[in-house]
Image: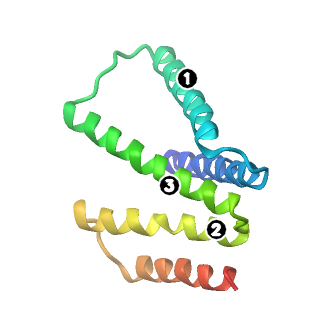
């Protein structure tokens, strides 16, 4: 198995666990902003440790800094919306698949911005993703 796929699988596992924790917080009526702050602190500490272990200087262009800031706002909105969905009694078996369809936005943007090829197989995969939401939400 090639290295990018191994990292993608690690991201899948860790992302799934992170998403599940949002269900735990919502089910326990945790205050979403407080949870997000604690989560953000651990995220930043993790990044700082990795940064120092790799002994690299902090380098980021102004453009990528702006993208990081905008991305952070989108991540905050996404996290808050998920937490609120669970706090209001949303079922994980419905909310998780809907949220996971965000990958379709990423795929569409990759097609548009980076001109990645749109193949029949990829379109079928997207179709299966939508179909899974329909089946899981009933």
Q: Based on the displayed image, in which of its 4 quarters is residue 113 positioned? A: bottom left
Residue that carries the numbered disc 3 in the rendered image: 78
Q: CA distance from mark 3 to mark 1?
A: 21 Å
Q: Position of residue 15 (x, y in %)?
A: 61, 50
As helix, strand or loop, the secondary structure at mark 2 comes to helix
Camera-near label (1 vs 2) is 2
Residue 5 vs residue 133, the one in the foreground: 133
Picture quarter with the C terminus: bottom right
Q: Residue at 42% x, 76% y: name it.
A: 122
Q: CA distance from mark 3 to mark 2?
A: 12 Å
Q: Work out whether 106 lies above or below 138.
A: above
Q: How would you rate the neighbour count of disc 3 (Cα within 10 Å): few for under 14, some for 14-19, many for 20 or more?
A: some
Q: CA distance from mark 1 to mark 2?
A: 29 Å
Camera-near label (3 vs 1) is 3
Colour setup of the view? rainbow
Number of the label disc, if any, that sits on residue 45: 1
Answer with mark 1 or mark 2, whichever residue precedes in sequence.
1
Residue with the most extreme right position: 28
Q: Residue at 51% x, 16% y: name it.
A: 53
Q: How would you rate the neighbour count of disc 2 (Cα within 10 Å): few for under 14, some for 14-19, many for 20 or more?
A: some
Q: Position of residue 11 (x, y in %)?
A: 57, 48
Q: Residue at 67% x, 51% y: name it.
A: 22
Residue that carries the numbered disc 2 in the rendered image: 95
- Is there CB contact under 8 Å for labels 1 and 2? no
Q: In this rendering, would 20 be left or right of 115?
A: right
Numbered label tally: 3
Q: Work out whether 86 lies above or below 91.
A: above
Q: Based on the displayed image, in which of its 4 quarters is residue 136 positioned? A: bottom right
């Amino acid at each position: 198995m090639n290295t990018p796929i191994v990292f993608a699988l690690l991201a899948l596992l860790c992302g799934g666990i992170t998403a599940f924790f949002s269900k735990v917080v919502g089910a326990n009526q945790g205050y979403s902003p407080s949870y997000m702050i604690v989560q953000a602190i651990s995220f930043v500490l993790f990044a700082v440790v990795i940064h120092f272990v790799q002994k690299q200087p902090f380098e980021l262009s102004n453009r990528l800094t702006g993208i990081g800031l905008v991305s952070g706002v989108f991540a905050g909105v996404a996290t808050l919306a998920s937490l609120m969905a669970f706090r209001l009694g949303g079922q994980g078996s419905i909310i998780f698949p809907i949220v996971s369809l965000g990958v379709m936005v990423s795929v569409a943007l990759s097609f548009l911005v980076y001109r990645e090829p749109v193949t029949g197989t990829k379109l079928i995969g997207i179709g299966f993703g939508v179909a899974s939401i329909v089946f899981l939400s009933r």
